[in-house]
Image: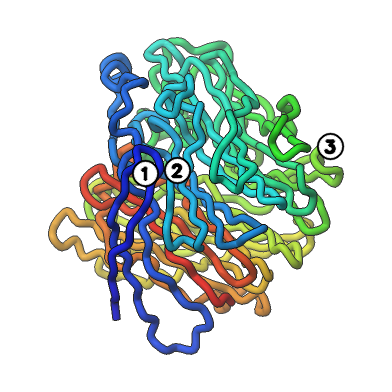
Amino acid sequence: MINCTKRLFLRRLGSSSLLGTVCAIGIASSGLAQSLGPLVQVTGPDPFASCTKDNVHQQETAYGSVLYPNTVIEPWVASDPTNPSRLLVGHHQDRWNDGGARGLVGVASSDLGATWADTTPQGVTECTGGQYARGSDPWTAFANDGTALFLSLVVDPAKPQTPFGARNSALLVSRSTDHGATWGGPVTLIDTKTSHALNDKDSLTADPTSNGRVYVAWDQLSVFPPSQTDPVLRTSEGIPLARDLLNSKTGASSVCEPFTKPPCKGGAPFFKFNFTGPSILSLSIDNGQTFAAPQAIYSPGTNKQTIDNLVQVTPNGDVYDFFTAINVTSAILNIGYVRSTNKGVNWSLPSFATDIQVAGVVSPDSGQPLRDASILYSISVNPVSGAIYLAWQDDRFTATTCTTPTGTIPIDSIAFIQSLDGGVTWSTPIKINQTPPNVTNPCRQQAFVPAIVATGDGKAIVVTYYDFRNDTNTPAGFEGTDYFAVICNTGTDCSNGANWGDEQRLTTASFNILNAPIARGHFLGDYMGLAASGPTTAVPVFGVATTPNVTVEYTRVISGLP
């Protein structure tokens, strides 16, 4: 049974409000311990609708960029350890097709996601009183004492004669001492004032075992000799760039990967330069008031790179920086990590948890490219046992292929592994998404953009993802997409796929993935938000495309876990 009500969504910016729909679905009696809360809209009206400081028309004219107003993309959510009902979300606002958004917006809840209010850090992009034209890759976190932190990647576009389509890139951290209600001015960690290096795919972690310590990690992609004429680069989008560089070394299989430029067959490199992409880290010991100078903690070498650097801290205090390693081993794509036993002062040599075998996802009927999480991963640490959990897209689990008018590709599923000994050994990859087989159209078996979290009591793991199981292509051109959660009780062996289940549909109705804006493929985000709130609750935040080139974000609290 579906019950829907109206709820007022408050936003401080512009003093506007939004009357949104809240739907609650009763779960049929099945012996499940957990329950789903109502579907609540997190985002409200476009706070940048009246902004003129970033001169949209000039960017469209000079760079050939396309703006998508009223889009919210790529949410990240954090829960305050001093009050688990207090949540902080950061996301892109008003996405550009060729990199970044007009700004990064924050929204906060003090009632476990029932209502939301704007809490956007100021002084970041031009639409929030800062100096940079665009923002990307938002990341939020709370320290043990409730200090709220908001990380922003910012760039200024510059085309055509720049290798990354940007004349500079910087990382800024905003800090709040009242749990995200108000913000101080941003602290600049790095501002690379060159067009030949790009800071990208950043993350921020507040150490749960040592209040005051904050780790910011990212990759820095550089080219040499500087390429001023190669038409293939020219984008400030690190994920598409990484895929292009990956394919420049490996070529592609039977079908051009959606983000590559020709030629993509035959394995011949098509870039005429060298590149590096080390893992960079900056450390704060005062909860983000100041940061040490950035340092490379792992440098894979020439024509190799890392991306998706995510710092995790185990209960014994060890610090890990995980990353996707590209061209480092014979497997080409791996999830690797370095470890520090002295709080980020020194780091080990790299180890590798698994390889990644991934095709990327297309829409199930017309075969249009989607920008998904292929080559990326999601990670969580069990806060009690210290077990480390990884989830990612992978195509190794089925011999069935997906054939659309645009070609034939393998089918991506959601893979999982765990380490119960601090990364010394890892389980064998297993498929955990519950997407059913579809003989009529196997493309509807694709699953993508996983997020993973362990609950606060360590007794459950939750993984969320999108799939197309409910798609019927009715009406024609409506390629139905939904969002799901699957759960494993850690009292069982979560390396056994049979112990994953209790799947819950988080969307209440399918949406058309073709309504998502195009940024190197239809795009809702490289990642979605998923946080543990207290001992037995998980809070997912995810994007939905509502009408052509318009998106919103929702949450739906999962409680009573495991």
What residue sits 42% from the left and 66% below the top? 484
First in sequence: mark 1 or mark 3? 1
Marks 2 and 1: in contact by CB < 8 Å?
yes
User: What amino acid is labelled 3 in the image?
Assistant: Asn
What residue sits 65% from the left and 79% below the top? 492
Q: Is residue 337 left or right of residue 67?
A: right
Give x and y (percent) for residue 523: 36, 44
Give the structural element (helix, strand or loop) at label 2: strand
Give the structural element (helix, strand or loop) at label 3: loop
Residue highlighted by disc 3: 346
The N terminus - image quarter: bottom left
User: What amino acid is labelled 2 in the image?
Assistant: His
Which numbered circle lies on residue 72?
1
Q: How many numbered circles are shown? A: 3
Q: Is residue 84 left or right of residue 28?
A: right
How far is the residue under mark 1 from the one under mark 3?
Answer: 38 Å
User: What amino acid is labelled 1 in the image?
Assistant: Val
Quadrant in the rendering for residue 517: top left
Query: Would residue 322 be seen by someone viewing this image from the given angle?
Result: no
First in sequence: mark 2 or mark 3? 2
What residue sits 29% from the left and 40% below the top? 70
Which numbered circle lies on residue 91?
2
